[in-house]
Amino acid sequence: MENHATSMYMPTAKAKHEHPSLVTKRSVKFTKKEDHPTVTINGLKEGIDQPDCPPANDHDLHKATTFVKDAKAGRNFKFKLDKVSLDFYDTYNRWYFVYLLYFFLFVIMALALFEDPAITNLELPIWTTMTIEFVCLCYFLFRLAHSKRCMSGIFWMGDIKNWIVLSVSVITLIDMVVYVILINRGKPWIRLVRILRPLFMMNFKETKDLRQAFRNIRRSLLGILSVLVLLFLVIGLFALLAREIFEDDVLLKPDASNYMSDYFENFWDLYVLVTTANSPDIMMPAYDASPWYMLFYIIYVILCIYIFMSIFLAVIYKDYRKHLKNEVQKSVFVKRRNLVYAWDLLKVWRGGAFVMPWQRWHALMKSVEPSKSILQLKLIWKVLDKDEDNNIDKRAFMKTADILNVKIIEKSRYVPIWEKHFPRVYNSAVSQIIVKGIKHKFFGWFFDLLIILNAGLIAFRISSIEWFFLTIFSLEIVFKLYALGFYRYFTNPWDVFDFTVIVLAVILSIAAKAAKDSNTLEQRSLDIILVLRVLRLVRIFNNFEKFQVIMKTLRNIGPSIFSFGGVILVIYYVYAIIGMELFAGKITYYGYPSEETAEIFNKSLLYCGNPKLNGTEFYRDHYCNNNFNNVAKAYITLFELTIVNQWHVITSGFVAVTSKAARLYFLCFHITLVIIIINIFIAFILEVFMVEYSLSKSSFESEIEKKIEELGLRAKFENNNFTDRTNLTPHMEVEDGPAGLSNEDLDLAKFQLGKSSNSVQSILQNMFEGELDEEDIGPTDIEDLDLLDPDQTDSAPFPFTLDNVV
Amino acid sequence: MENHATSMYMPTAKAKHEHPSLVTKRSVKFTKKEDHPTVTINGLKEGIDQPDCPPANDHDLHKATTFVKDAKAGRNFKFKLDKVSLDFYDTYNRWYFVYLLYFFLFVIMALALFEDPAITNLELPIWTTMTIEFVCLCYFLFRLAHSKRCMSGIFWMGDIKNWIVLSVSVITLIDMVVYVILINRGKPWIRLVRILRPLFMMNFKETKDLRQAFRNIRRSLLGILSVLVLLFLVIGLFALLAREIFEDDVLLKPDASNYMSDYFENFWDLYVLVTTANSPDIMMPAYDASPWYMLFYIIYVILCIYIFMSIFLAVIYKDYRKHLKNEVQKSVFVKRRNLVYAWDLLKVWRGGAFVMPWQRWHALMKSVEPSKSILQLKLIWKVLDKDEDNNIDKRAFMKTADILNVKIIEKSRYVPIWEKHFPRVYNSAVSQIIVKGIKHKFFGWFFDLLIILNAGLIAFRISSIEWFFLTIFSLEIVFKLYALGFYRYFTNPWDVFDFTVIVLAVILSIAAKAAKDSNTLEQRSLDIILVLRVLRLVRIFNNFEKFQVIMKTLRNIGPSIFSFGGVILVIYYVYAIIGMELFAGKITYYGYPSEETAEIFNKSLLYCGNPKLNGTEFYRDHYCNNNFNNVAKAYITLFELTIVNQWHVITSGFVAVTSKAARLYFLCFHITLVIIIINIFIAFILEVFMVEYSLSKSSFESEIEKKIEELGLRAKFENNNFTDRTNLTPHMEVEDGPAGLSNEDLDLAKFQLGKSSNSVQSILQNMFEGELDEEDIGPTDIEDLDLLDPDQTDSAPFPFTLDNVV
């Protein structure tokens, strides 16, 4: 029987297109739809029913498990199919190896903090940083070798990412050797190679999200480019116009320099005006000379700021959305392909079609997700097996990966600890009245009111009554703990927040009282804790539906924003390294002596250590701390440049201590980060928000929920936060279990949907779910599979259309 | 026969729902689909064919004409149907009456320029402005009376817009009287009633676009409100946090004031930070004290600037789009209703269905569009009459209004004037070679190159060779005029631009040469003309496809942006009037004496006439001209506030000369204009741009174009600008004309689509065309028609769903 299962698998292996490791020379005939009843594959008649399903052979199960795991994690890896390679691949995907990779990626990026120029007090000797870097590189190379062992040679060779990691490692090693040699000879060497480090972050299989985000940005660039060129052309024209218009009046700026007399200065000033940073200063001299001159600026501002910038956003929005959709479709495709492989390995011919019986599916799932209980698996099976014949078809099987990603929480009947240990006291009439009172909405409202009152008093600094509030909020915690028990209290994040804040406040207050001469740090923590309590106000607003939607959206787009943050941090990193090489040590903050104290000030520290800054706006505005003396400072400076305002002043400071060429650095940064990345970020939020705002649950979640509802398995007490106090008492009516889930099972557990993993990928797939045809059950055609060569799928633009898939 | 046509009309008048003026007491039975073959209306059998169509009676034709005209112009006016009222209504819609209204609206708005505080040298005596205002009011009231005459009383009374115009007129009149009395007694009187003037602009039938835009904004407000409240809550919390965190360090700002020590100051500073205007200044004292403090600002900035502001945009985009769609659907509905009325008046029973024969349609069109030639009408008929049976059905008729709005240009074969008068010379071999050379693409490229060269020389101020360029560009004009002839040269906007610039440059250069001691004004005009020539560079970029799309989009969204500009101007107006009442005369620009010249400066004029400004950043930055001393200055100040940058400095100036309460004015302005209106503007551009970017032609345009192509009537020489030089020679093959368009007709003319009227309405209808069901041919149900009461359709939210319509 096991033999049969294997022979079933072999004929459907469509030559090399089925899987890279299955490359055989046999020519195989097949029709497109393998679930067609009269299909004849490779001369072998498959139309024989198999009512008693044979267990799948171990090796096939292992392969299928690996395919489903890859589908679930969204991996696209062409591993070899022999047993040893599969075992290697399992090890390759072990969580500790993966987390070790993340750790070393973090370490190599964080090294910049300790390398010269290091953050004060964090300097490490060269040998230390070098050793750490070397360890990181070793792990990266080991990881590379490991992946090489699991993958067939051709595919590994064909993947450009591996070569990038390899070559960056080699370049870094060479650079390290050169650096060490030169340092020993006393010659300085710029370690600009450090800007290559982010390439490690982007070129491992595990950092797919980041790579994808970068690829999207890169592809959106083309669309922006023409608008950008047009914008520069317009600025160039206006710069010329400005010179011709204003020159003859010989106007002066407030700092007595000539106004709009030099073409390249005009260009720079007008570019800064597009960012609004020098408005209205740049206009005032002209305006003072004649109000009509304002017409020039009004036309310019409307054209360049409002119209061009909106068009930028529009073009980016449109392009980015298109590329995003392409990416998502591609990864859906990869997922489905993995599932098709798994399906082909385990499917059984039954009742005129290929199906997957419960036995095989269950064996597969046990091996994919050992942590899922049989109950959960049965629930999932119920969702998939719509006609309840204990078989699922290919279409249902294709949903497996997504449905496994929905978190289902099993809830046993929970009883407060008090009831468990002192049932008589807890269930007495008085106690029950108290519990009911605590659970009543007025109890919540009363404390909401107290929070508002407390917040008001804090704002107006009336602190004499503070002890009263502390006491009463502590009492609230005790009451709630009594009514809800520990488990339910501490699983509600708001209650945990309350608890932390109040307990901390009590401890700190007592400590401060005990110490008498209150330590400033202690006092300040107390102050902050005080204010954090005000944050509880947000909870009151949470009662209004409109706010709930916004809060929920904010919570859900959180992870996506973080992944986008990764992109920004990488770009910051590159600019920070370059910035440090260019500007480190030129400007240092030593304080700003007033005219009187300047006399006794160390002369070499005057004007932030650089006399060239004397009299500049940069120094006058006290911007000296915005420098590139170490990575942290560089990041903060770049952050301020990202906010845009006064960026031209920061630029002017560095121009003063170097040359006008420094503007190029700041201009490039502005274009990459503000004009391109921030616009893409806004486009991204716009898109994600619009989807989230309307779409509250993925279709899988709602499908499972419906099923849970249908089976009467919903844990009714799930809303145990105080915003929904009416439903607090646990209802535990056990309804008759349907076939497949026995009554004993039902006694054991109720289900509830947990917070689904709102990974970027799942949100993105939500975004384009409506546009993806559910009927596309994966590639069945040779031409399509050809498109899945590793070098194509991951780097080249993928001509993905629905027509290609079906 | 005429009698019959009337009787046809009467039975289908579905009681009061057919048209307000047709209110009768008869109970009328009818089925929903009146084009059902077996329909019997009011006991009268309609199933009798009328192969020979009787001409419609004059009154019906008049009514139908008025309905179609209203549909075409998008008017929603419940005029009375008797002959006299119709005549009155015709007069009411005469272009001079409408333009007179626009004129007086402009005048009453422009009055603010001349009223106290007036623009210098533009002051008019009170009696003059009063008289002008009175004349405006009289015309408004006349217009109101006129509309009352055309409309039945109930509907006029039910329209709130009429009452607004009436009451604002009365209030203004009372205010004028009070003002005159008080002025004569020497008492001042604030004419704040002027802020009501924009209400005139928004409450006439003719200013529908503006009213619609305002209504959309008003409705989008609700969605924004909750985000705004949340934003303010977050700012409030951070203000509290800032106080607790920074207070104990006793930090100082560069101006030696306390840092973050007062709650309301913190709130203001943090609000300003949301607008980025005081970044990074507000952060620097904390940063200088400890780098860790920056964490506070980084969290705040990411949360409030990037996330909140993006969500603002997202919420606004979503809401605005929804309301816009609603509005557009409503106006489509009104249009279709008018067309249904017209249809019912003129339809004829033929071949089992109601149809409109060519004779009646032609009569109607002749009366609606007397300017359209019979040829054009025939072409349109060809488009509508798909089955070529000389009848159109209701669905085709419903397209009439839209198709009339597409401009079709009739082109006769054009011959250059030279060829006409000197055919022998012009057609000689040499001449033809020259013409061919001029039309060759290298000719164009050569001059493109010269333009680039010239632009470079202008930028680098090498002017000695200028005469050479002037001569050669003049020659280019002569050559082109020879090859293309006057008509085709002067119908290409780029050529006209070239011509104007070059001819002006030649004239001014000669004048400057002649005068020897070149007048500055002359010199400057010459300089500007010089630069304008550089604008021709844009034309070169026009050769690239990507730019063409952007340029085309820019050109097409132009009108929509203008209509949006109207909204902004109205809001500016209201704020300008309030600003003048609050701040006029407080700050005046008298120049900024340096320390030396301050001695001899008139003391009362020091510090912009207000000693309170001494030492403020406002004065230091030379912002004194940003004041509210007259409407023009107020507009410019508000414009600068719209750009946002340094708005807090401008605010601080007015706070210095009044009180901190002045912040409220600037805060309100910022919220209304920047946060709400500008975001809506961006949302609008985003939407319009996205539609325009993909959608190049409305479906009607392409339908007509297809028809023109099909009939072989395209004028082939339409692309006579030099970007498409290959197709320049006019092809005039006359193909056989189809039935309905005789060959003589074809000899006469070729058609070409003109620039379609890209009114806001048509772009908007494009936007939602995909979502509007073409099958909705107007209301046929009693319930739907009830929704069309004037007080409902135009003011209350309209529960418009497609289900309602069908």
Image: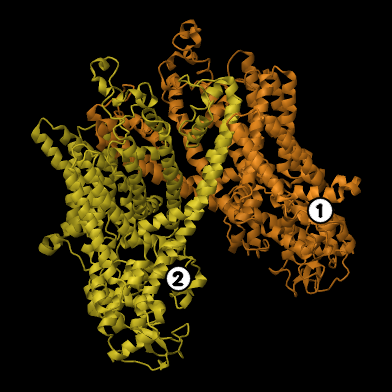
Chain colours: A yellow, B orange
Percent of width and height locating residue A46: 40, 91
Residue B104 visible, this orientation: no
Outermost residue toward the left in this view: A514
Query: Is residue B589 positioned above or below B62 on the image?
Result: above
Tell me how far mark 1 sits from mark 2, CA to CA.
Answer: 52 Å
Outermost residue toward the front in this view: A185
- Amino acid carrying label 1: it is Glu
Q: In this view, does B323 lie to the left or right of B522?
A: left
Secondary structure, mark 2, is: loop
Query: Is residue B696 positioned above or below A272 on the image?
Result: below
Percent of width and height locating residue B174: 64, 26
Q: In this view, does B240 lie to the left or right of A802?
A: left
Residue denoted by label 1: B410
Taking depth in this image into account, of B277 and B240 the one nearest to the observer is: B277
Residue denoted by label 2: A787
Percent of width and height locating residue B121: 65, 17
- Amino acid carrying label 2: it is Leu
Instruction: Say if labels 1 and 2 share a chain.
Output: no
